[in-house]
Image (tube, rainbow, N blue to C red):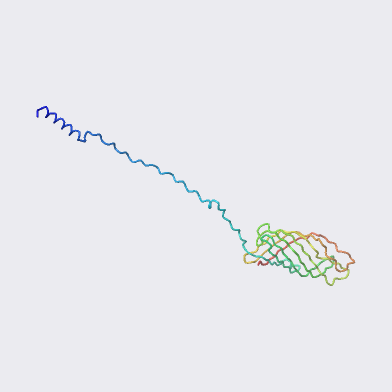
């Protein structure tokens, strides 16, 4: 082999070795940080139709504090006459009551220089509406119809007497019935004499004059509710 061939072979070998070395090769691209994609927003699930259509809750009605149906009252002021008087009131509704009044006792009527004693019997009706509160505790307005009959005995000669009669009135009152049953009631108003009493005694003297047909209506009663 001549010298020129050896030089060519040497150049070819050096070129192959240089191509095999990695120093001159371009480095691979460097990987960047991993990208984080945001999670999609989750919308709340709609409420079931059955829950959306439910009616509002029903609030139970407030029950009365007590369950009294009947009140029996006694009138201590009427003992001044003296007269024993009782009233029984029945609960028709929570705000409505009706009552019956009965009484009996002695009655004395005085006139010009004379006086007469007799026996009185009375009976009456009342209707009460409780504008504030109820049957057990409240303010009442109402009306009263009361008949008073007085029987005079042993009237002296030349004496004519009349007392009692039928009266109609209106009143405003207040009633308190405790949980145990004790009850207090006060009523104030006015009543009008719609039917005058009959004359007893010497009827030839004519009817005694009626001074005033308007009379006070006053009740202060104590009793018990059941």
**Corner quadrant of residue 187:** bottom right
Q: Position of residue 200 (x, y in %)?
A: 85, 68
Q: Is residue 21 left or right of residue 165?
A: left
Identity of the residue furthest to the bottom in this view? 154
Q: Residue furthest top?
A: 4
Image position, residue 114 (x, y; %): 84, 68
Q: Nearer the viewer, residue 41 or 78?
A: 41
Specify the farthest residue to the right. 204
| Rendered position, 130 above or below 104 | above
Between 109 and 195, the one nearer to me in the picture: 195
- Given residues 221 and 128, the one toward you in this image is 128
Q: Is residue 28 left or right of residue 16?
A: right
Would residue 220 be found to the left or right of residue 32 on screen? right
Q: Image quarter for residue 90?
A: bottom right
**19 above or below 93?**
above
Count of marks, rendered view: 0
Quick one: quadrant of the N terminus? top left
Residue 225 position within the rendered picture, expressed as x and y whole percent measured from the top left: 66, 66
Q: Position of residue 8 (x, y in %)?
A: 14, 29
Image quadrant in which the C terminus is located:
bottom right
């Amino acid at each position: 082999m001549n010298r020129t061939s050896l030089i060519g072979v040497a150049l070819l070998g050096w070129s192959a070795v240089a191509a095999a070395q990695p120093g001159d090769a371009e480095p691979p691209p460097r990987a960047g940080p991993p990208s984080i994609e945001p999670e999609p927003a989750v919308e709340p699930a709609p409420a079931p139709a059955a829950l959306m259509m439910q009616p509002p809750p029903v609030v139970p009605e407030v029950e009365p504090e007590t369950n009294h149906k009947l009140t029996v009252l006694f009138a201590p002021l009427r003992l001044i006459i003296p007269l024993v008087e009782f009233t029984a009131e029945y609960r028709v509704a929570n705000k409505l009551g009706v009552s019956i009044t009965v009484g009996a006792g002695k009655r004395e009527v005085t006139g010009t220089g004379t006086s007469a004693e007799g026996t009185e019997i009375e009976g009456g009706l009342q209707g009460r509406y409780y504008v504030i509160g109820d049957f057990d505790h409240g303010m009442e307005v109402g009306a009263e119809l009361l008949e008073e009959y007085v029987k005079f005995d042993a009237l002296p000669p030349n004496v004519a007497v009349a007392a009692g009669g039928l009266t109609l009135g209106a009143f405003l009152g207040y009633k308190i019935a405790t949980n145990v049953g004790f009850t207090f009631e006060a009523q104030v108003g006015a009543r009008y004499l719609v039917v005058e009493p009959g004359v007893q005694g010497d009827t030839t003297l004519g009817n005694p004059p009626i001074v005033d047909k308007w009379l006070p209506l006053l009740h202060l009663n104590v009793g018990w509710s059941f």
